[in-house]
Amino acid sequence: MTAMVNLGDVVEILKGQVPAKVSDDGYGPRLFGIAEISGHAPRVLEPGTSLERAVYLRTGDVVVALLGERGLGATALIDGPADGAVLARECAAMRVSAPGLLSTWLYGWTKSEHFNEQIRRHASGGSMSRVNVRDLAEFRLPIPPRSYQERLEAEIDRLDVALRSTTDLIRNLEGLREAEINLAIAKALP
């Protein structure tokens, strides 16, 4: 049987406190914000940035964008490369606190229309919509039995493997295409 709960009852919601001031020097604490949710590698914080109130991410945290014209509600599941990164101010981390909830289920739910409809309903602001942490805590989350959550986790893992393989194949085909073009041009030159 699936239970419907308030999100704030099963996860700890941690709001990012550090502004996204980044440096190109490559040294220092890593930052995880809206750009990183979109797939960019964690950037490095500008030297001298205060980390007094920083939230440090852990593997299994689900980060959600609280602000954005089009990226509002975008999410990422934190894994090895982002573990320990500092959470940026325009995001919140959802850290599972209930034993019956898998972080992969939480992440999967954030990719659903059920979650996105709640984001749209609670969004406020004009051109730059936002959702506040208090409203996020009131979102309704379905929690089915653990075995059901584990089946989704296994299916997502299987599809992720297929996506990585397909991405590698596309990259290899693009390289082969470029090599074929260069070889054909080289043969045609006098």
Image (cartoon, rainbow, N blue to C red):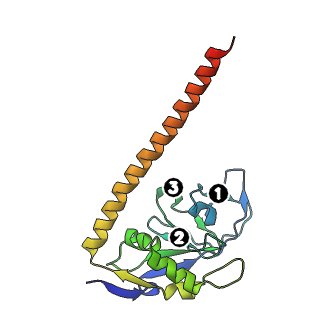
Helix, strand or loop at label 3? It is: helix
Q: CA separation, marks 2 and 1?
A: 16 Å
Residue 55 drawn at (x, y percent): 58, 72
The image position of residue 123, as x and y in percent, is 61, 83
Q: Nearer the viewer, mark 3 or mark 2?
A: 2
- 10 Å neighbourhood of mark 1: few (<14), some, or many (≥20)? many
Number of the label disc, if any, that sits on residue 63: 2
**Nearest the eye: 27 or 65:** 65
On the image, the x and y values in percent for residue 107 come to 44, 70
Residue 131 visible, this orientation: yes
Given residues 138 and 99, the one toward you in this image is 138
Which label is found at residue 43? Answer: 1
The answer to whether residue 33 shows anywhere in this view is no
Q: Of the residues shown, which amino acid type is indicated by label 2?
A: Val
Left or right of 24 on screen, residue 168? left
Looking at the image, is mark 1 or mark 3 earlier in the sequence? 1
- In front: 142, or 31? 142
Mark 3 lies on residue: 81
